[in-house]
Amino acid sequence: MANLRDVLIKPYITEKTTSMMADNKYTFIVPLTANKVEIRQAVEQIFKVKVLDVNTLRVMGKTKRMGKHIGKRPDFKKAVVKLAPGERIEFFEGV
């Protein structure tokens, strides 16, 4: 990736991910081509925190119907980032 800001597309906020924030785990949607090293570097440089662990998983898009027409939502990749004890990302705190 050319720019580290292109690695983190947006935060992924659900009921489950907000409960994971208590364990210092934050979830982001990243490009399908991003790897764990790029994700770690992006989070550390953008948010100025220390990353302990990065877990990634590919989420396959659901097939949806609109009458007789069938479509598919796009696939995406989630990254769960575990921060060092005492570190926080203020961006998520207002959610």
Image (spheres, helix red, strand yellow):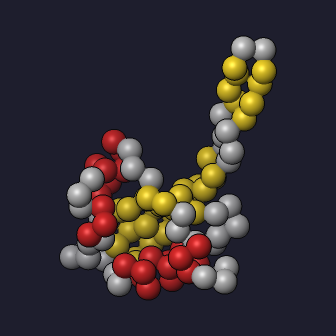
Give the left or right position of residue 89, taking residue 66 as reference.
left
Closer to us: 35 or 53: 35
Up/down of 10 relative to 83, above or below: above
Whether residue 1 is visible, yes or no, is yes
Q: Residue 4 falls in which quadrant of the image?
A: bottom right
Q: Residue at x 72, y 35 (%)?
A: 72
**Residue 92, percent across and down?**
30, 61
Quarter of the figure with the N terminus: bottom right
Side (left or right) of 73 relative to 41 = right
> Residue placed at 42% from the left, 81% from the top?
46
Direction right: furthest residue = 69
- Residue 74 placed where, x, y %? 69, 45
Q: Position of residue 47 (x, y in %)?
A: 37, 79
Above or below, 37 against 90 in this view is: below
x 78%, y 14%: residue: 68
The answer to which quarter of the image holds residue 26 is: bottom left
Residue occupying the far top of the picture:
67
Residue at 70% of width from left, 21% of height from top? 65
Residue 32: x percent and y percent?
68, 61
- Residue 22 appears in view: no
Residue 6: quarter of image: bottom right
